[in-house]
């Protein structure tokens, strides 16, 4: 009865279909945009551009407003993410591990903030900011972006903290660690992979956020997406938009590289107790 | 080295009384098993000693020093959890070194002590393994080592082997006993397996609804259970409710001389202390042949089922009418012993 079951490699059809669908939906448009950004001349009905070149890249990168917008957006995203983490992570821990009056109401209020049309909320906030002289300032935009990150910077880490085995924390107390030390050495590392994804979402989300940045920041504070909109509105040249789009993917690429490193380091599996 | 004194400790969770005025002295180097059904308050008691729950009242002293007001990290106790609770983001060495690092021991000493304790639990050379790369038994050994390496005065184990298979459980149980004897460490061991308690303990505490039902040496708990509950909980026991009149206990057609005052009583008879003869008190429902012995289920006319252990399973068969002849009995009234043969 010792027939070795040869591990037959079956074709993973479902995986292939998924990969194909993803390719069509994501990669093809990306390729088109990239092609556009390198097209000096591309007229209908040609399938490929008549002339490739870096003309529009040079023109775009020569503009100082593009560079200042890019660095502004990166700074803004970093600052917002850092502040959001500093506020939200301890709050999330409190939500996950403690009971206090009004806990549930407060917790769901973060969701409620996202359930209503955002633009109305933004206009109301803009009115308040006008009073506080925060309109068209860096910190005004930081504040408005902060609001946008609250939801997933609270909800995702709460789930992450809740899934940390309490016995692990108790075992650390037992070994002689105080509550703070337990948080740093046990709870945070255990929740890290999930929290990292929330931080990433927050960074990328802030980078791409347009409505709030435009409403509060304009005209002085111009982030990349805001700049792109004004480009598209003012100059109906597809290549400008294409070049800016490719530039806009920079944070996503950075994020992807980071994610890969986290995944590869195996801390994902460990963090999830795998 | 260290003794543990628990005096009148109670724990009330909003409506449930988990532990009810519990008192116990554990002598230096003694291994005491807490045994009881699910929900009898064993874990709650252990967690109060470890500092993870605050007693509603009472006092817990280690070497005559009150520890109730101390947080877990300040108590000289070491706890081993059922779910091992190893830190999965650290390797075995880091798990064991964590507490020593907190105590700011020198690097060389940490290394030495971790290696010594790994050797003790039979995991020499496993330091660099991730905890997730260990088998269930190895994980539980690491968890034990993690507590031992800090040399606690009191070792607390909460059903540490409950999730392991029978064979491994027996092996680890013996290892724990060996280590405990060698280190002479005062130990409280929670289990709801009676065989585990009987095999391990210097003394057994049988708990029920948060209270002590009996504290005694293992053989005494088996031979002379203090209450019908203990009698029924440890080993197999026939518990028969009936009445005593004129020195005779009777239940349905079954009767046996019992020299106590008239009134209700509960009779406790081990299956091995009940032999059978041809007669008419009950009818054999089933005979199970275990080779070395037979187990007979007898039904009294009112439906009461009684078990008897016989040396030759072939001697009786289902459907036969028999009389029950107890060779050793205990009798209880109002939750206390009123009679015992011998
Ligand atoms: N945190 C808590 N809040 C409320 N009730 C609790 C809490 N912890 C335990 N209890 C209750 O206290 C009683 C004793 O529980 P405990 O966990 O000590 O039992 P146990 O003897 O360890 O049982 P088991 O063998 O199932 O582990 C149970 O009725 C339980 O429901
Ligand atoms: Mg328990």
Image: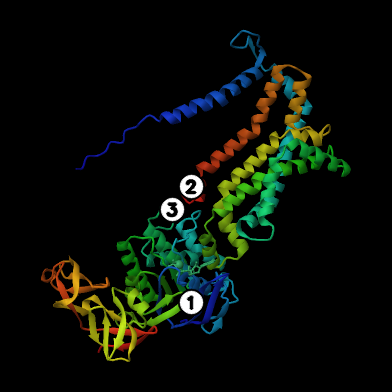
* CB atoms of marks 1 and 3 within 8 Å: no
> Relative to the observer, which residue lies in front, A235 or B36?
B36
Q: Are marks 2 and 3 in contact (CB under 8 Å)?
A: yes
Q: Residue at x 41, y 59 (%)?
A: B139
Determine whether the residue tagged by mark 1 lies in a helix, strand or loop: loop
Q: Position of residue B49 (x, y in %)?
A: 51, 74
Q: Which mark is residue B153?
A: 1
Disc number for residue A269: 2
Q: Chain of mark 3?
A: B
Dot label at residue B132: 3
Q: Nearer the viewer, residue A255 or B210?
A: B210
> Residue B115 occupies which quadrant of the picture?
bottom left
Residue B8 in view here: yes
On the image, the x and y values in percent for residue A102 come to 69, 57
The mark nearer the N terminus, 1 or 3, is 3
- Residue occupying the point 55% across, 82% down: B65
Taking A71 as reference, is B259 left or right? left
> How many badges with numbers are in the image?
3
Residue at the outermost left position = B315
Q: Chain of mark 1?
A: B
């Amino acid at each position: 009865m010792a027939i070795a079951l040869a591990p037959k490699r079956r074709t993973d059809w479902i995986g292939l279909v998924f990969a194909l669908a993803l390719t069509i939906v994501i990669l093809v448009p990306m390729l088109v945009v990239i092609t556009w950004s390198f097209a000096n001349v591309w007229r209908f009905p040609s399938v490929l551009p008549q002339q490739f070149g870096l003309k529009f890249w040079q023109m775009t990168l020569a503009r100082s407003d593009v560079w200042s917008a890019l660095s502004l957006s990166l700074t803004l995203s970093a600052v917002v993410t850092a502040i959001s983490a500093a506020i939200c992570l301890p709050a999330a821990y409190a939500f996950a591990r403690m009971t206090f009056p009004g806990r549930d109401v407060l917790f769901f209020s973060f969701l409620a903030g996202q359930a209503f049309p955002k633009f109305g909320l933004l206009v109301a906030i803009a009115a308040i900011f006008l009073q506080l002289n925060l309109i068209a300032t860096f910190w005004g935009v930081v504040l408005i972006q902060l609001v946008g990150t609250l939801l997933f910077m609270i909800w995702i880490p709460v789930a992450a903290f809740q899934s940390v085995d309490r016995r692990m924390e108790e075992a650390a107390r037992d070994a002689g660690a105080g509550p703070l030390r337990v948080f740093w050495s046990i709870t945070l590392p255990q929740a890290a992979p999930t929290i990292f994804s929330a931080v990433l979402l927050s960074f990328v989300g802030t980078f791409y956020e347009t409505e709030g940045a435009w409403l509060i920041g304009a005209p002085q504070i111009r982030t990349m997406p805001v700049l792109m909109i004004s480009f598209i509105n003012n100059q109906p040249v597809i290549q400008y938009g294409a070049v800016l789009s490719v530039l806009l993917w920079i944070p996503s690429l950075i994020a992807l590289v980071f994610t890969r490193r986290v995944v590869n380091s195996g801390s994902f599996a460990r963090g999830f107790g795998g | 080295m260290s003794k543990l004194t628990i005096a009148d400790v109670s724990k009330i969770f909003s409506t449930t009384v988990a532990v009810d005025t519990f008192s116990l002295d554990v002598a230096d180097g003694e291994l005491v098993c807490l045994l009881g059904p699910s929900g009898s308050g064993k874990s709650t008691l252990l967690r109060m000693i470890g500092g993870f729950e605050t007693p509603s009242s009472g006092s817990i002293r280690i070497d005559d020093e009150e520890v109730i007001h101390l947080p877990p990290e300040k108590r000289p106790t070491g706890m081993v959890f059922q779910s091992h609770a190893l830190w999965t983001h650290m390797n075995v060495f880091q798990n064991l070194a964590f507490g020593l690092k907190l105590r700011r021991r020198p690097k060389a000493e940490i290394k030495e002590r971790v290696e010594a304790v790994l050797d003790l639990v039979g995991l020499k050379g496993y330091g660099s393994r991730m905890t997730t790369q260990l088998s269930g038994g190895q994980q539980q050994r690491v968890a034990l080592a993690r507590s031992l390496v800090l040399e606690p005065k009191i070792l607390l184990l909460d059903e540490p082997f409950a999730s392991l298979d029978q064979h491994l459980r027996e092996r680890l149980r013996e290892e724990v006993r060996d280590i405990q004897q060698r280190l002479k460490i005062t130990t409280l061991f929670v289990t709801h397996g009676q065989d585990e308690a009987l095999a391990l303990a210097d003394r057994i505490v049988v708990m029920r609804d948060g209270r002590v039902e009996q504290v005694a040496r293992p053989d005494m708990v088996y031979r002379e259970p203090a209450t019908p509950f203990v009698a029924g909980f440890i080993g197999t026991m026939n518990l028969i409710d009936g009445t005593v009149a004129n020195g005779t206990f009777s239940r349905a057609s079954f009767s046996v001389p019992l020299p106590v005052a008239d009134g209700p009583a509960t009779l406790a008879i081990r299956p091995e202390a009940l032999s059978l003869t041809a007669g008419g008190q009950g009818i054999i429902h089933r005979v199970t042949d275990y080779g070395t012995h037979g187990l007979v289920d007898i039904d009294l006319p009112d439906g009461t089922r009684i078990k008897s252990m016989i040396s030759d399973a072939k001697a009786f068969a289902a459907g036969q009418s028999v009389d029950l002849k107890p060779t050793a009995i205990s009798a209880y009234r109002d939750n206390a012993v009123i009679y015992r043969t011998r």
